Image (cartoon, rainbow, N blue to C red):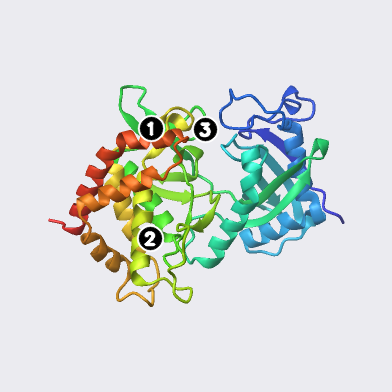
Amino acid sequence: MPPNPKFYYYLYDTQTPVSRDDPSWQQPLPLSRHLTDKNDGLSISHGEYFLAIRQFLENDHFDIIARALGQRLQIKVKAADIREIRVCLAKHGEFYHPARLEVSVGQQSADFVLNVAVSNNGIQTLQEEYHSLKRLNDEFTHAFIPRVYSFGEIKAAGHRKIPLFLGDWLAGYHEFHISGDPTGDAANIWIWDGDANRALLSADQQGEIYRQAARILTYYYNVESFEQIFAFHHAAGDFIVRVENSVVDLKLISVRRYASLLRNQDNLENGSPDVETILQALLLFFLGLSIRMRLDRSDGVGDIVWADRLAVAATLQGFFEGLSLKPQISSLPDTIDRCFAYSLSLCSGEDIGNLCRSSVHAMDPRDPEAAFVKQNLNEHIISLTRSIEQFLNPS
């Protein structure tokens, strides 16, 4: 018997079903989270979005989703066993329009994400992101990113190709952003659980956000090839968080690019960097991380905002925790975290300041964030050098 699961479609949550007869089915899909942005003529309708997802899942007689179900549920799944597929447009992201899939097989069900690229920015990055996520899951022991299963392209109306990839949906995790406190003037981090539901994080929980984010990005930094995840941004929703019983757990869901930090690698001997090069590159990675970690946009879409000083010490702690997860490097005399701590202790505050300024000077001057960072750089350098001193010389 051929597979013939029932499909149901929803907008943003399963309380808002949509069908071909609804006016929203024909309405164009916003190209970004900025709902007031004008479409550039490349958008598709909500209906075309849902039908592209259905076509992707139906390919090869539902083989893609059947295999993903088998891996997720640790059982053998036949495509004919799939009863229902509920497709919910989750949000209009900065790069993608992710859908949450609730797939029922027998008496069990599993949730997946299907990232769909509609805008030019998303189309240019989605396939590379899929391969980056797959590579990092294959090469690294710890998993701070979602598992991905398959990539494909579907022809929509007008013979336009829409790229998609299937991955695990991380239930209970939500975006977070710096936002002004509605009851006052303080800028704090709020978790976004839907448009109407927001939860304010405590100062300790906010510190946990930055500590865990730095640990994750450092863990995936390759100290020998200098490859790193970039350019992550809190405003794009690259990290998501779950808070249960006041305990914070962070995941990274986007790896748009994974490439080397250094443009010129002519100084590598026999393909392997020397100790000095490893430690110098690691210092540049850390300083760049400490700056980018503080950038966000108000409520994810508003003005550029700068995280509180607590982010600096938390980033430093998370950075060293990420280093401690790495295996021993044969060319180093000790563990990478101890070697770097010693190397960092030799840097003066002036050294740190000059390197930070050089890093910011290398930013694209057309980028509005470049001017914003420059305005806050002196404060950042002071906070960073103070945090380094306290970390290396605890009282």
- Discs 3/2, front: 2
Can you say which quadrant of the picture contains the N terminus?
Answer: bottom right
User: From the viewer's perspective, is residue 151 above or below residue 177?
Assistant: below
- Is 232 situated left or right of 84 in this image? left
| CA gap, disc 3 and disc 2 | 40 Å
Name the spot of residue 254 as percent of width and height, x first.
53, 48
Residue drawn where x is 53% and y is 56% of the image: 258
Name the spot of residue 142 as percent of width and height, x first.
46, 63
Q: Secondary structure at mark 3?
A: loop
Residue drawn where x is 81% and y is 36% of the image: 157
- Is 393 situated left or right of 1 in this image? left
Which residue, given by chain and number where applicable, does mark 1 sit on? 305
Name the spot of residue 39 as percent of width and height, x first.
66, 27
Q: Residue furthest right?
A: 1
Name the spot of residue 75 as percent of width and height, x first.
66, 64
Which residue, given by chain and number where applicable, does mark 2 sit on? 281
The disc labelled 3 sits on which kind of residue? Gly
Which residue, given by chain and number where applicable, does mark 3 sit on? 194
Q: Secondary structure at mark 1?
A: strand
User: From the viewer's perspective, is residue 194 above or below residue 288?
Assistant: above
